[in-house]
Structures are given as C-alpha cells and as structure tokens.
Image (cartoon, rainbow, N blue to C red):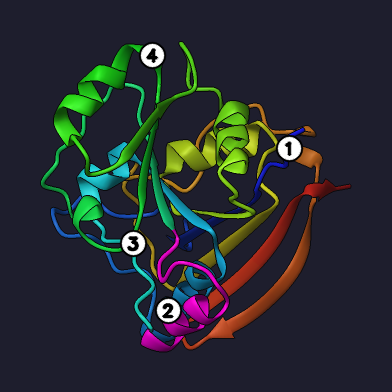
Amino acid sequence: MTTRPYVILSAATSVDGYLDDTSPERLLLSNPADFDRVDQVRAESDAILIGATTMRKDNPRLLVNSDERRAQRVADGKPAYPLKVTVTRTGDLSADLNFWHHGGEKLVITVDDAVEKVRATLGDLADIVSVGPDLDWGMVLDELGRRGVGRLMVEGGGTIHTQLMASDLADEVHLAIAPLLVGQPEAARFLGAADYPGGSTARMKVLEVRAIDDVVFVRYAPKERS
C-alpha cells in the first residue's frame, strides 16, 4: 500500500483571514524573518504544491533560496530543490510562468480531459499525469506517495487549502498572521465555506505559537480534534 505524504498547509494571512487584497500588486503579509522560516520548511519538504490559479495570479518561482539549505539537501542525498507540483482541472496553464523555468523537477497533476491540452502547452517542461476523470485529492496524494514524496508543503491557494482541510487530509497547518486588516469580501481567503470534520465545535490541537518580529506564527494539528 502506498504511503501518502505528510501534508503541511502553509499560509500567511491578515488578522481577518485574507491571503491578499484586491489590488494588482501582491499584498506582502509576511516579513523577512518569516520568509526565512518558510524557506526552511521548503528545504525540509520533498515537494511543494500550489494550484494553477495561484500560479497564474502570483507567478511564483517556489524555490529554496538559501545556498546553505540547498547544499544541505544535496549532502543528504536529495535534489537541491524539492519537486514542484501543480494541480489543474482545466489545463489552463502558460509555459511562460516562472514556475517552469526555475528550480528542479516539475509535475502537473490533472484529469483525463485536460492531459493532452497540458502536454501541448508545456511539452517537456514538466512531467504530466492524470488521476482519472475527476481531481480526487486522495488519488493526488497516492500519486505523490508513489513518487517518493514523504513530506508535502502546500502553499495555496485558498480553494486547495479548503478542499484538503474539508477532506481531513492536512496533517499540519502553518499559519503566519500579519498585523493587517484587509476587509474586502471579494479578496482571497485562507479557507472558505465547507463541511469541515467535526463541525464548528471541534477544536484543533495547537502545536506551537511564537512571535516572528511582527507576525504571529501558529502550528495546528487538524486531525487531532476534541
């Protein structure tokens, strides 16, 4: 039986739970010290996953930025960079995005109807695999497990965080809370409406709370509810 990865949901939010505002520029919620913490978590991960919507909107490179951390990965017998993964139902991707042109290996997980579209768009920029007619998150994790991914860092967006939390597939949540208020209903949120395990009274276990300069970092264990 395939062992699924240990799944960490990682996000920075405003105090009122937003991932961004509605301005054209990305809202920087974190600070340099917390960005360094994120770099460490990336370096400790076997793969980093984002959704296609987040890729199109933010155009991230998703790298381990520290030379020392990359060198340590290599010394440990790992690639310098974790595997970069995106998921898409529609196959609406662009070959020009930063994601494909920086770092190491890339993987696209999609559905049967979109496989040929993705292959035509990306060519040999990424490995491309379908998990069937529907994007089932259990099958996504099974596929990553078969590829040797033991620790998966999920960096958004909100729809993916919501789906993994609602499916009870997240092992940890890493939440950096910035001292900002967005207050724009149309802006992206960390989590949306869903039927979460245990309902509104199920309390998650808190693993860690600490201040990182002006950001409060909290680690939760979503599967440990009371």
Label 1, label 2: how far apart the Cα atoms are = 41 Å
Q: Is residue 151 left or right of residue 97?
A: right
Label 4, label 3: how far apart the Cα atoms are = 26 Å
Q: Is residue 186 visible?
A: no
Q: Which residues are magenta?
A: 67-82
Q: Is residue 30 left or right of residue 148?
A: left
In the rendered image, which residue does mark 4 sit on?
A: 112
Label 4, label 2: how far apart the Cα atoms are = 35 Å
Q: Secondary structure at mark 2?
A: helix
In the rendered image, which residue does mark 2 sit on?
A: 70
Which is closer to the viewer, label 1 or label 2?
Answer: 2
The part of the image, by quadrant, that contains residue 107 is top left
Q: The disc labelled 1 sits on which kind of residue?
A: Ser
Q: Is residue 60 left or right of residue 29?
A: left
Q: The disc labelled 3 sits on which kind of residue?
A: Leu
In the rendered image, which residue does mark 3 sit on?
A: 62
